[in-house]
Image (cartoon, rainbow, N blue to C red):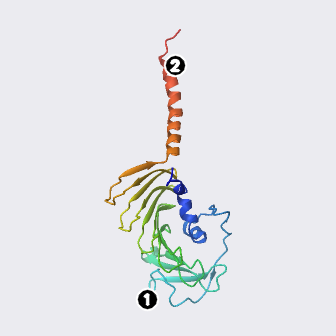
Amino acid sequence: MKGLSTDRLGARTLVCGRSARLFVVLFGLGGLNCGGAKKPAEQPEQVVEGRRQDDQSRCEFKGRDDRDVQESSSPGSVLANVRRVYGYIGTSSERRRILLCREVDTNLDGMKDLLRTYGDDGERLSEQADADYNGKIDTWITFGKRQPAKVELDKSGDGKPDEIRFYTAGKVARVQRDTNGDEKPDVFEIYDAGRLERMGLDVDFDGQVDTWRRDQVRARELEEKERTEVAPENDAKKSDEAPAK
């Protein structure tokens, strides 16, 4: 169906349409293949001393005595490009150090463009990223238990998300887009198992869907699946109802 096919890629469109290197870091997608590219084997970081005066850090640690900071250098970086900020929770014998946030300069231009925050048990909570390296955050990720649950994107460059993707079990389930910049979604996409099923359009921008467009190919597939599942049940029912000879 015209207008739907380009969105079938779901999460893959999101990942491969921007800097593949950055989003491999974002999602940890070792199996992602963007035009045949594969994630290189990870190499150990080297702990180093020193950092730039202003590298657009978003981890809260400056001027705080209750924070520990570790600077390290990933392969290919002469200066420190990875920062981990630690804090403390608990008291007395139960007091322990925990990782609060980690930020990275992924393109080695001296400015941090990726920030990840963590919970008390080391679980990932959120990420922010400057995916086009222009000095502004344009990607926000909220994690569920193990995988991203929501991804917000600023594609217009105004500092506010105009596309929101919701994920279930690692696959895109819903997408909302604001196409006219009024900060309200006017395009709504519904996915089934990561595949676009239907799209709702708010053509007069009043906050209500005016028309739904279905993926006709997908609709026929679902109808055929329903028929094949119902047919054996009907055959069994007819067999039970047939008179004994």
| Nearer to the camera, 102 or 155 | 155
The disc at residue 239 is 2
Give the x, y percent position of residue 131: 53, 73
**Which corner quadrant of the image does residue 164 belong to?**
bottom left
Would you name the residue on which mark 1 appears?
Answer: 63
Viewer-side residue, 166 vs 4: 4
Left or right for 240, reference 81: left
Q: Position of residue 138 (x, y in %)?
A: 47, 73
Query: What residue appears at the point 49 percent right and 15 percent down from the top-left corner?
Result: 242
Whether residue 62 is situated above or below residue 88 in the rendered picture? below
- From the viewer's perspective, is the residue at label 1 or at label 2 nearer? 2
Q: Which of 236 and 154 is in front in this view?
A: 154
Residue type indicated by callout 1? Gly
Residue located at (59% from left, 88% from top): 49
Label 1, label 2: how many angstroms apart (C-alpha)? 80 Å
Q: Is residue 132 left or right of residue 181?
A: right
Q: Are marks 1 and 2 in contact (CB under 8 Å)?
A: no
Residue 186 at x, y percent in the picture? 38, 60
Residue at position x 50%, y 88% in the image: 54
Q: Is mark 2 on a helix, strand or loop?
A: helix
Point out residue 58 in the picture as x, y percentages from the top left corner. Answer: 46, 80
Of 79 and 134, which appears nearest the observer?
A: 134
User: Label 1: how many residues lie within 10 Å, few (<14), some (14-19) or many (20+)?
Assistant: few
Count of picture labels: 2
Farthest residue toward the left?
A: 206
Give the residue furthest to the top: 245
| Amino acid beneath label 2 | Ser
Q: Mark number for residue 237?
A: none
Name the residue located 56 percent from the left edge and 64 percent from the top edge: 15
Q: Earlier in the sequence, mark 1 or mark 2?
A: 1
Question: As drawn, is 106 to the left or to the right of 86?
Answer: right
Q: Is mark 1 on a helix, strand or loop?
A: loop
